Image: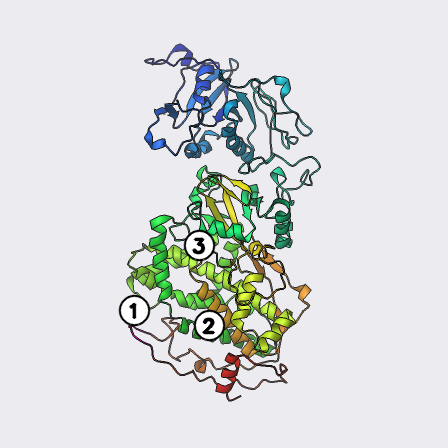
Amino acid sequence: MDFKSSDTITGPRSEDVLPDTATAAVKVVIVGGFGVGKTTMVGSVSEIRPLTTEETMTQAGVGVDDNRGVESKTATTVAMDFGRISITDQLVLYLFGTPGQERFWFLWNGLFEGALGAVVLVDTRRLEVSFDVIGRLEERGVPFVVAINSFPEAPRHNLDDRGGGAGGPPPPRAGPGPPAVPRPPPRTARPFIGASTVTTPKAPHSFPGTPAGPPPGCPAHGADPVGPFGAGGLRRLYGPEAERDAPGLFEKLRAEHGPVAPALLHDDVPIWVVLGHSENLHMLRTHSVYTRNSRRWRLVQDGTLGPDYPLTPLFAWQPICSFAEGAERERLRGAVNNAMQQIDYRGVRRAINRHSNRLVNEFGQDGRADLVSQFTDHLPMLVMLDVLGLPEEYNEQMVDAARDMLQGTETANASNAAIMGILERHVARRRAQPDDDFTSSLLEDEARLTDDEVAQHLRLVLIAAYEATSNLTANVLRMVLTDPRFRAQLNGGQMTVPEAVEQTLWDQPPFSNMLGYFAVQDAELGGQQIRKGDALLLNIAAANVDPVVRPDLEANMQGNRAHLAFGGGVYECPGDDLGRAIADTGVDALLMRLPDVELAVPETDLHWTNSLISSHLKELPVVFSPRQPLELSSSPGQTGASRTDWEISSPAPRPPAAGPVPPQAAPHVPAPPAADGPVATVPAQRRGAWRRLVEWVRGG
């Protein structure tokens, strides 16, 4: 490619002045990988003195910019190139060249505004540097042509060597080049000055070797936007199939690709789904390669995924331990761990028991209830509000907002903002007036968290604990009510409620997926080549049923905590003990109040609401013998005093005094009033130790 020198000239030249006859202009963007010659191209064809923004390359770029194959390059574009071509006396073409390094790709958003299309400049010696460039254009639906920069030592190709598309012409080129990648017919027609129209569907070029569109005969041909297949013939993790049978979808991915599979998130955003148990463990434990810092995600770096993306609340970077790296993660995680250790778990269990009994009081006399909407949706939030020091009046509002945000709906961002508003005001109150709660512990920690950092961590603890524990409690109750072997073991003393909770964490983990992890460098995982900047989905549910670790899904998993329900590695959930406490204490309290509770509908009539990260049981209708309300002032953990300070246990000095804690007598539990009608009894079987102790205290 020849080059027109742009010598320094003082003042405008005559050819630089826009002709008076020009009445219309079009814009084309020149794109390509690092060092392919974009600046040279603009300078070669521009009729005016080109504008360039080249700067000398320094040592700061070592290890950041990939200069393999262009080691002699000494300058690079840091903003844009600009040139002009007169098509006719009335029409001019403006050329905008883009920088090639990924760290400057955020500038593309502005450069592409109003552009009719792009020219992709390719160096045939280094075709791989153009893959991500083409992928980004395809993801945005930008029409483009491919131009070859014929370097002296580059291989030569004949124009006749190009391949045909799947039912349509191959992409046009501005010169000879290698065979074209087959593509499906254009779905839309968009004008492109001086070349045939080329419009391609979105394609997940994060996956090397993935075709740009579905192969011939693939069901994706002609599929609507919410069909099971998207660009490249890859399966979508959203739409009717995912909502109807998410576990089945992931097993199809396992059968088709193995333990790590390429798939598509909402809006056909590419992601790797990690399905294997050992592969997930490796990802969780190798934090030097895989991080939760979403700012490492290529699509976040280049601006493809912005704040309006529906799943953004699930992965957007925040100043919290779940997204931090290195020393900053240790600082933040240390503060959270310290605050968790300050929680009085005995007092929490009393609060769980009190809230459980109060919820049962609200429907106990009816003889029927929906345990999801009337119990499991509310118990975790009530407890977490206690732990954080928030008033119970926020319960309904928080439940609705949390559920909406986690489902990734169109209003998810607004719900997230509502939750953060409540938490930020609460942090400001606790900063001015500390109390004996988790919020004050975070504020007083030696790590000196800012108010924003504290509010963000409260959101993390609140939402994660609520969703996980709500789902876990509902799943335990469903299993108790539908699996005769499970119920018999539980009532017979062969399985305690905590053991039932642990079995459920294997079979129905509260979070089925976690978005996401991001590759810090190129790596191999499960036979797939993961590239730096790729996103990965931690698939907890699929890992827990991996045939490699669970060849027999009916096998009892009692005593085995190798499940991934709470993650692992440096980002492991710090509140697993709190979640277990809410689930096992809440379930035990409900079963004590309603010993004859039974499912009111066939198990096949139960339905779930599925989102990317969890499956939430819609309803759990039950029947039981009506029960009179229990006097809560006499229930365990209730002091009878006014709770305007929302304490969850008796006040204690902070921090707790060192030394042994004297044993406490078991609290007196009064027998509940007799039911209005006949009470169905459970056949006499061997009872668990806790049940026998409670019945002995009650005088049974």
Say whether marks 2 and 1 touch (CB < 8 Å).
no
User: Are there few (<14), some (14-19), or many (20+) residues within 10 Å of tag 1?
Assistant: few
Q: Please, what is the dominant secondary structure of the magenta stretch?
A: loop
Query: If you read the primary sequence from the N terminus, does the residue marked by circle 1 or circle 3 appear first?
Result: 3
Q: Is residue 537 magenta?
A: no
Q: Image height check: is 131 above or below 240? A: above
- On residue 352, the disc is 2
- On residue 655, the disc is 1
The amino acid at mark 3 is: Gly
- Highlighted range, magenta: 651-661
Nearest to the observer: residue 176 or residue 425 = 176
Nearest to the observer: residue 530 or residue 19 = 530
The amino acid at mark 1 is: Pro
Nearer mark to the viewer, of 1 and 3 = 3
Label 1 and label 3: CA atoms lie apart by: 29 Å
Query: If you read the primary sequence from the N terminus, does the residue marked by circle 2 or circle 1 appear first?
Result: 2
Label 2 and label 1: CA atoms lie apart by: 23 Å
* Residue 659 in picture, x, y percent from top left: 29, 74
The amino acid at mark 2 is: Ile
